Amino acid sequence: MRPQRSRPGMILSYALLSVLALLFLTPVVMMLTGSLKPDERVLTEAGTLAGFIPDQASLQNYTDVFTRTDFLGFLINSLFITSTIVICGLLVNALAAYAFARLHWRGRDLLFNLVLALMILPLEAIAIPLFYGVSLLGLRDTYLAQILPFIANAFSIYLFYSFFIGLPRELEEAARLDGASTLRIFFSIILPNSKPVFASVAILSFLMWWGAYLWPLMVTIGPEVRPLPVAIAAFYTLPPLQWGDILAFGVMMVAPVLLVFLLFQRWFVRGVAASGIKG
Amino acid sequence: MASIRLDKVSKQYDGHDAVIEEMDLQIRDGELLVLVGPSGCGKSTLLRMVAGLEEISAGEILIDDQVVNQLPPQKRNLAMVFQNYALYPHMTVRENLAFPLKMQRLSRDEVNRRVAQTAELLSLGNLLDRRPKQLSGGQRQRVAMGRAMVRDADAFLMDEPLSNLDAKLRVEIRSEIAALQRRLGITTLYVTHDQVEAMTLGHRVAVMRAGKLQQVATPSRLYEHPVNVFVAGFIGNPGMNVLRVMLETVDKALVFRLGEHCFTLPQSVMENYPDLPNRSGQMLLLGIRPATLTLVESGGNGSLEATMSSAEPLGHETILHVNADIDVVATDTEDPGNTLLKRPTLTAIIPGHRHFKPGETVHLQIDCDKLHCFDLQGTALAHH
């Protein structure tokens, strides 16, 4: 049984959590209310209570975004790039993790340790050689350059591995005796019983690549294949500087992320618990 | 149906002692052979090797005289029931039963027909649309049996299939398994650590200890003629009492000396063990089944005086644990003749519901016709 907290302890923890929630929510609420206000009031009311009150709300800033930029194009680019990375990543990383967790082959442990070691390598450290490689292949300013290098991901493999290793081995053995091949076992037995970890990996990858900035900035030249994070940065520099428009752009950029999280929240929490990710 | 033969099969993990050592075993066509032994003796490993889930280090496994060492599990046509049932949690009972048939690429009509047939046989008809988590332990067990039965496998492998059930259900399902096996006549290798299961289910029982086969025989043969003290101690509940005794010749008669007790061997014992006279002057191990000890009023030849340690009334019988001035040895060691129990209690079973006071003096009569004689290494003496 969990020990019951004392009343003062409860009040203190709720107070601390409320302050934290306030700190996290303030910028988001300000972005939302600011996006609904006339441009001249955005900065003057920032930091005051009025900044949080969307009186005289209008969608003018949102229509401005669509008229001043090709927002829809950038949104489609971002959706396409991120979804492709996520969907292909789920398949590739889950299969790799399954091979590490369950199949016996020479060099498995060594390779798995190398994959784990890759987790500590930030993109910034390999960005230049990667850029060189992409340029050599003639892939600059393409979707492929933004997708291909990031499908296989060490952290995703680790998350899948942690989950698969905890699944009862007998399920696979029973399926093998029932006549199923390894791939059949993966798709018919492992996959349907691993929804939580698939949801976790999908959300984490989506968040990671939806907000990716450095790499798309390096490999894109024109606006045709540019994703939202690079587009919003360019929007900053597009005269005249309209803060209301920028905030509206931000709101529309964040909305899909929130939607994905809300859709998969239940599985995400279970998956995070099952794969042992701790904050 | 098929026969399964193990020919000098060994299993050794890298850098460790062998877990299975040169095992020879034959499971006859249509036979239910129970592999029994204490936890960690290698019986499940052996089963998994037959299934193809573990590689074998040496020897051959033959199914219907065909060597299957290199065949993957799915090609051996064996069905297995796992200890935790291993039902696919995301599938309904119907889908669980149909899975092996779908793997055989049977037509949908044939799959449905066989699933219905199996469900009827195991009374699963009203559970077909439930998922495993909506079933009780006994129902899950039946579904696991059904999944094994549905696909016309050559043999069944069962890995402690009853160990997750409560005692009452275990007895019920045990008789169901026995009846099903009789009806289907399918070759079955059944692994358990429970000697009661082994004795009640097996046509023959193979007793294992530390990776080695001790004895393969019918349940009654195992009980009546154990080849060593390990089998004697393992089979039977409670196990056989094994005492260290001195065989002496007194006035041309052979006597066993147990501490202060001494009793003359009747002619029947000499007939059972013709080699005994040649062992006069040697220490031996004497096996006495608890059920062959009877409570008597006063001592005579073949009776032991003992003090009551504890009694366990079970209703139809009472198990007595008594202390006597005798050397009781451990049956599960490599050197039983020299491994005395620290608390040397003797166990007896007497009929009826009886109560005793701790410390009370009782006399137990040994049935000399039912004695078992072993040498000091624990091997049974030649029996007539």
Image (tube, helix red, strand yellow):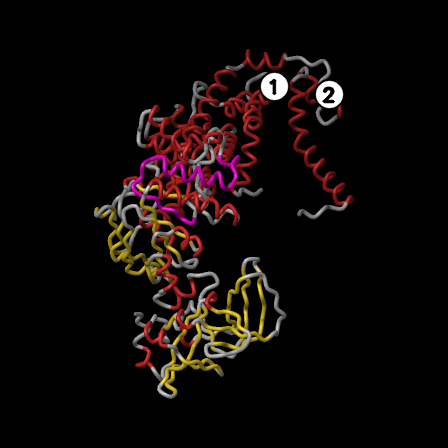
- The answer to if B155 sits in the magenta stretch is yes
Identify the residue shown where x is 41% and y is 40%: B145
Residue wearing tag 2: A53
Residue in the foreground of this view, choosing between B310 and A136? B310
Q: Amino acid at mark 2?
A: Ile
| Horizontal side of residue A249 vs B40, given as left or right | right
Q: Is the C terminus of chain A in the top left, top right, bottom left or bottom right quadrant?
A: top right
Q: Position of residue A95 (x, y in %)?
A: 38, 36
Kindly indicate the quadrant of the structure image that contains residue B43: bottom left
Residue in the foreground of this view, choosing between A176 and A143? A176
Q: Position of residue B18 (x, y in %)?
A: 33, 61
Residue in the foreground of this view, choosing between A169 and A128? A169
* The residue positioned farthest toward the right in the image shown: A8
Task: Please tell me how many numbered marks the rendered image carries.
Answer: 2
Q: Chain of mark 2?
A: A
Q: Amino acid at mark 1?
A: Ala
Q: Is residue B291 visible?
A: yes
* Disc 1 packing (10 Å; few <14; some 14–19; many ≥20): many
Q: Is residue B12 above or below residue B164?
A: below
Q: Position of residue B360 (x, y in %)?
A: 61, 74
Residue wearing tag 1: A248
* Disc 2 packing (10 Å; few <14; some 14–19; many ≥20): some
Circles 2 and 1, Cβ within 8 Å, touching? The answer is: no
- The answer to if B327 sits in the magenta stretch is no
Q: Is residue A150 visible?
A: no
Residue in the foreground of this view, choosing between A208 and B320? B320
Bounds of the magenta span?
B132-160
Kindly indicate the quadrant of the structure image that contains residue B367: bottom left
